[in-house]
Amino acid sequence: MQKKIVKGFSLLEILVALLIIGIVAAFSYPNLSKWIKDRETRANVNKFVDYLERIKSEVQSGKYALVAIGMYEPDQWTNQFYYMTKEEWAVQMKNNPPGRTNRNNPGQYNNKSILNNAKGCPGYPPTIDYQNWVKGNDIYIWPSENRMWPNSWVCFSKDAIIKPGGEHSRLSSTLQAWLIICSSSNTTTSNGNNRCNDRNKNDYRYAIKVSRSYKISVYKYHLKKDEWILQ
Protein backbone atom coordinates (compact mmCIF):
# COMPACT_ATOMS: atom_id res chain seq x y z
CA MET A 1 0.00 0.00 0.00
CA GLN A 2 1.20 3.48 -0.82
CA LYS A 3 1.51 5.99 1.99
CA LYS A 4 -0.35 9.29 1.62
CA ILE A 5 1.95 12.25 1.77
CA VAL A 6 0.46 15.22 3.63
CA LYS A 7 2.05 18.38 2.38
CA GLY A 8 1.89 21.43 4.68
CA PHE A 9 2.56 25.09 3.98
CA SER A 10 6.14 26.13 3.60
CA LEU A 11 7.58 28.97 5.69
CA LEU A 12 7.77 31.13 2.57
CA GLU A 13 4.09 30.58 1.77
CA ILE A 14 3.11 31.50 5.35
CA LEU A 15 5.19 34.68 5.19
CA VAL A 16 3.63 35.67 1.86
CA ALA A 17 0.13 35.08 3.25
CA LEU A 18 0.92 37.20 6.32
CA LEU A 19 2.31 39.94 4.11
CA ILE A 20 -0.85 40.00 2.00
CA ILE A 21 -3.02 40.11 5.12
CA GLY A 22 -0.92 42.97 6.46
CA ILE A 23 -1.23 44.96 3.25
CA VAL A 24 -5.00 44.47 3.11
CA ALA A 25 -5.33 45.45 6.77
CA ALA A 26 -3.21 48.57 6.25
CA PHE A 27 -5.47 49.78 3.44
CA SER A 28 -8.75 48.82 5.08
CA TYR A 29 -8.02 50.12 8.61
CA PRO A 30 -8.65 53.82 7.86
CA ASN A 31 -12.05 53.02 6.34
CA LEU A 32 -12.91 50.70 9.20
CA SER A 33 -11.85 53.35 11.73
CA LYS A 34 -14.00 55.98 10.00
CA TRP A 35 -16.96 53.61 9.92
CA ILE A 36 -16.63 52.91 13.64
CA LYS A 37 -16.43 56.62 14.55
CA ASP A 38 -19.40 57.50 12.37
CA ARG A 39 -21.45 54.56 13.67
CA GLU A 40 -20.63 55.59 17.24
CA THR A 41 -21.78 59.18 16.70
CA ARG A 42 -24.92 58.12 14.84
CA ALA A 43 -25.87 55.67 17.62
CA ASN A 44 -25.60 58.41 20.25
CA VAL A 45 -27.63 60.81 18.09
CA ASN A 46 -30.37 58.19 17.74
CA LYS A 47 -30.46 57.69 21.52
CA PHE A 48 -30.84 61.44 22.03
CA VAL A 49 -33.63 61.62 19.45
CA ASP A 50 -35.40 58.79 21.31
CA TYR A 51 -35.06 60.88 24.47
CA LEU A 52 -36.58 63.92 22.73
CA GLU A 53 -39.43 61.84 21.34
CA ARG A 54 -40.21 60.52 24.81
CA ILE A 55 -40.25 64.03 26.32
CA LYS A 56 -42.46 65.25 23.47
CA SER A 57 -44.86 62.37 24.09
CA GLU A 58 -44.99 63.10 27.83
CA VAL A 59 -45.83 66.74 27.11
CA GLN A 60 -48.58 65.74 24.70
CA SER A 61 -50.04 63.31 27.25
CA GLY A 62 -50.24 66.09 29.85
CA LYS A 63 -47.38 65.19 32.17
CA TYR A 64 -45.82 68.61 31.54
CA ALA A 65 -47.41 71.81 30.27
CA LEU A 66 -44.22 73.10 28.69
CA VAL A 67 -40.67 71.74 28.58
CA ALA A 68 -37.45 73.51 27.65
CA ILE A 69 -34.33 71.48 26.89
CA GLY A 70 -31.02 73.30 26.60
CA MET A 71 -27.45 72.45 25.70
CA TYR A 72 -24.96 74.77 27.36
CA GLU A 73 -21.19 74.92 27.74
CA PRO A 74 -19.02 74.15 29.55
CA ASP A 75 -21.16 71.21 30.69
CA GLN A 76 -21.92 70.01 27.18
CA TRP A 77 -22.41 66.38 28.06
CA THR A 78 -25.65 66.80 29.99
CA ASN A 79 -28.54 68.93 28.83
CA GLN A 80 -30.55 71.23 31.06
CA PHE A 81 -34.19 70.32 31.63
CA TYR A 82 -36.84 72.80 32.78
CA TYR A 83 -40.61 72.46 32.82
CA MET A 84 -43.58 74.70 33.53
CA THR A 85 -46.32 73.47 35.86
CA LYS A 86 -49.90 73.32 34.67
CA GLU A 87 -50.80 76.07 37.16
CA GLU A 88 -48.13 78.42 35.82
CA TRP A 89 -49.09 77.59 32.26
CA ALA A 90 -52.71 78.53 32.98
CA VAL A 91 -51.56 81.89 34.35
CA GLN A 92 -49.36 82.54 31.33
CA MET A 93 -52.07 81.64 28.82
CA LYS A 94 -55.05 83.53 30.25
CA ASN A 95 -56.17 86.96 29.08
CA ASN A 96 -55.12 89.95 31.21
CA PRO A 97 -52.60 87.90 33.24
CA PRO A 98 -50.71 89.23 36.28
CA GLY A 99 -48.31 92.04 35.66
CA ARG A 100 -45.27 89.92 36.35
CA THR A 101 -45.97 87.91 33.17
CA ASN A 102 -45.57 90.96 30.94
CA ARG A 103 -43.21 93.04 33.08
CA ASN A 104 -46.14 95.29 34.05
CA ASN A 105 -46.47 96.52 30.50
CA PRO A 106 -49.59 94.74 29.18
CA GLY A 107 -50.14 97.12 26.29
CA GLN A 108 -46.79 96.19 24.77
CA TYR A 109 -47.83 92.52 24.70
CA ASN A 110 -51.48 92.91 23.62
CA ASN A 111 -52.69 92.43 27.20
CA LYS A 112 -51.11 88.98 27.24
CA SER A 113 -48.10 87.43 28.87
CA ILE A 114 -44.82 87.61 26.98
CA LEU A 115 -45.01 83.86 26.42
CA ASN A 116 -48.59 83.96 25.13
CA ASN A 117 -47.96 86.94 22.89
CA ALA A 118 -44.76 85.66 21.27
CA LYS A 119 -45.53 81.91 21.43
CA GLY A 120 -41.76 81.50 21.44
CA CYS A 121 -39.34 79.22 23.27
CA PRO A 122 -37.58 81.23 26.02
CA GLY A 123 -33.91 81.95 25.58
CA TYR A 124 -32.73 80.90 29.03
CA PRO A 125 -35.46 79.78 31.49
CA PRO A 126 -33.26 79.79 34.64
CA THR A 127 -32.93 83.59 34.57
CA ILE A 128 -36.39 84.64 33.32
CA ASP A 129 -38.24 86.85 35.82
CA TYR A 130 -41.68 86.85 34.14
CA GLN A 131 -42.18 83.06 34.02
CA ASN A 132 -41.85 80.44 36.73
CA TRP A 133 -39.89 77.35 35.70
CA VAL A 134 -39.00 74.20 37.62
CA LYS A 135 -35.62 72.53 37.12
CA GLY A 136 -36.08 68.82 36.43
CA ASN A 137 -33.64 65.94 36.47
CA ASP A 138 -34.82 64.11 33.34
CA ILE A 139 -31.61 64.70 31.44
CA TYR A 140 -29.67 62.93 28.71
CA ILE A 141 -26.00 62.27 29.44
CA TRP A 142 -23.82 62.39 26.34
CA PRO A 143 -20.70 60.22 26.22
CA SER A 144 -17.36 62.01 26.00
CA GLU A 145 -16.95 60.80 22.40
CA ASN A 146 -19.22 63.61 21.25
CA ARG A 147 -19.40 67.39 21.31
CA MET A 148 -22.40 69.63 20.73
CA TRP A 149 -22.98 73.14 19.34
CA PRO A 150 -24.41 75.76 19.85
CA ASN A 151 -25.69 76.91 23.24
CA SER A 152 -29.41 76.76 22.54
CA TRP A 153 -32.84 75.68 23.77
CA VAL A 154 -35.72 73.78 22.23
CA CYS A 155 -39.28 73.70 23.63
CA PHE A 156 -42.21 71.30 23.56
CA SER A 157 -45.78 72.21 24.53
CA LYS A 158 -49.03 70.35 24.03
CA ASP A 159 -50.41 70.72 20.49
CA ALA A 160 -47.25 72.64 19.54
CA ILE A 161 -48.64 75.95 20.82
CA ILE A 162 -45.16 77.27 21.56
CA LYS A 163 -42.63 77.49 18.73
CA PRO A 164 -39.79 74.99 19.24
CA GLY A 165 -37.11 77.61 18.62
CA GLY A 166 -33.51 76.53 18.43
CA GLU A 167 -32.83 77.19 14.73
CA HIS A 168 -29.36 78.66 15.17
CA SER A 169 -27.31 76.22 13.07
CA ARG A 170 -27.26 77.01 9.36
CA LEU A 171 -26.89 73.87 7.25
CA SER A 172 -27.57 75.66 3.95
CA SER A 173 -29.08 78.88 2.67
CA THR A 174 -32.56 77.42 3.21
CA LEU A 175 -32.06 74.91 6.01
CA GLN A 176 -31.47 75.56 9.69
CA ALA A 177 -31.21 73.15 12.62
CA TRP A 178 -31.15 73.20 16.39
CA LEU A 179 -28.12 71.14 17.37
CA ILE A 180 -24.89 69.99 15.73
CA ILE A 181 -23.33 66.80 17.12
CA CYS A 182 -19.69 66.02 16.34
CA SER A 183 -17.16 63.34 17.14
CA SER A 184 -14.51 64.44 19.63
CA SER A 185 -11.97 62.46 17.57
CA ASN A 186 -11.69 65.21 14.95
CA THR A 187 -12.96 68.34 16.74
CA THR A 188 -11.49 70.47 19.47
CA THR A 189 -13.06 72.20 22.46
CA SER A 190 -15.12 75.37 22.16
CA ASN A 191 -11.99 77.53 22.21
CA GLY A 192 -10.10 75.60 19.54
CA ASN A 193 -9.62 76.37 15.87
CA ASN A 194 -11.42 73.21 14.81
CA ARG A 195 -14.40 73.40 17.11
CA CYS A 196 -17.67 71.59 16.58
CA ASN A 197 -20.03 73.87 14.65
CA ASP A 198 -21.97 74.23 11.40
CA ARG A 199 -19.10 75.78 9.44
CA ASN A 200 -16.07 73.52 9.78
CA LYS A 201 -15.75 70.80 7.15
CA ASN A 202 -15.54 67.94 9.62
CA ASP A 203 -16.70 64.40 9.04
CA TYR A 204 -18.87 62.51 11.57
CA ARG A 205 -21.19 65.51 12.03
CA TYR A 206 -24.94 65.21 12.53
CA ALA A 207 -27.63 67.85 12.95
CA ILE A 208 -31.00 67.70 14.70
CA LYS A 209 -33.86 69.87 13.44
CA VAL A 210 -37.19 70.35 15.23
CA SER A 211 -39.88 71.69 12.90
CA ARG A 212 -42.74 74.00 13.86
CA SER A 213 -44.97 70.92 14.23
CA TYR A 214 -42.29 69.30 16.46
CA LYS A 215 -41.19 66.78 13.87
CA ILE A 216 -37.64 65.75 14.74
CA SER A 217 -35.31 65.20 11.77
CA VAL A 218 -31.67 64.11 11.59
CA TYR A 219 -29.18 65.26 8.95
CA LYS A 220 -25.72 63.91 8.27
CA TYR A 221 -22.86 65.91 6.76
CA HIS A 222 -21.45 64.30 3.61
CA LEU A 223 -17.79 65.29 3.42
CA LYS A 224 -17.21 64.57 -0.28
CA LYS A 225 -20.43 66.25 -1.42
CA ASP A 226 -20.05 69.05 1.15
CA GLU A 227 -23.74 68.96 1.98
CA TRP A 228 -26.14 67.87 4.69
CA ILE A 229 -28.30 64.85 3.83
CA LEU A 230 -31.57 63.93 5.52
CA GLN A 231 -31.35 60.55 7.22
Image (cartoon, rainbow, N blue to C red):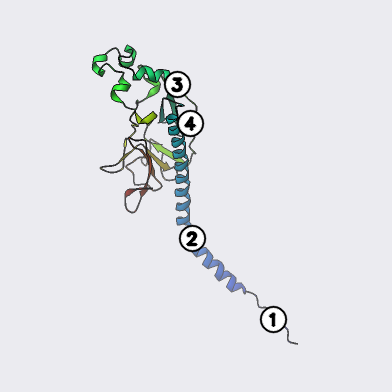
Element class at badge 3: strand
Residue 227 seen in this snapshot:
yes
**Which of the two marks, 1 or 4, is nearer to us in this view?**
4
The residues tagged by marks 4 and 2 sit, at their Cα atoms, a distance apart of 41 Å
Residue 156 seen in this snapshot:
no
| Residue type at tag 3 | Val
Is the residue marked by circle 1 packed among few (<14), some (14-19), or many (20+) residues within 10 Å? few
**Position of the N terminus by quadrant:** bottom right
Q: Which residue is denoted by mark 3 in the rendering? A: 134
**Of the residues under marks 4 and 2, which one precedes in the sequence?**
2
| Residue type at tag 4 | Ile
Q: Which residue is denoted by mark 4 in the rendering? A: 139
Is the residue marked by circle 2 packed among few (<14), some (14-19), or many (20+) residues within 10 Å? few
Image x and y of residue 35, in percent: 46, 53
Which residue is farthest right?
A: 1
**Of the residues under marks 4 and 3, which one precedes in the sequence?**
3
Element class at badge 4: loop
Does residue 176 appear left or right of residue 28 in this picture?
left
Q: Quadrant of residue 120?
A: top left
Element class at badge 1: loop
**Which of the two marks, 3 or 1, is nearer to us in this view?**
3
Residue drawn where x is 32% and y is 49% of the image: 227
Identify the disc placed on residue 26.
2
Does residue 192 appear left or right of residue 54 in this picture?
left
**Of the residues under marks 1 and 4, which one precedes in the sequence?**
1
Identify the disc placed on residue 5.
1
**Of the residues under marks 2 and 3, which one precedes in the sequence?**
2
| Residue type at tag 1 | Ile
Front residue of 111/128: it is 111
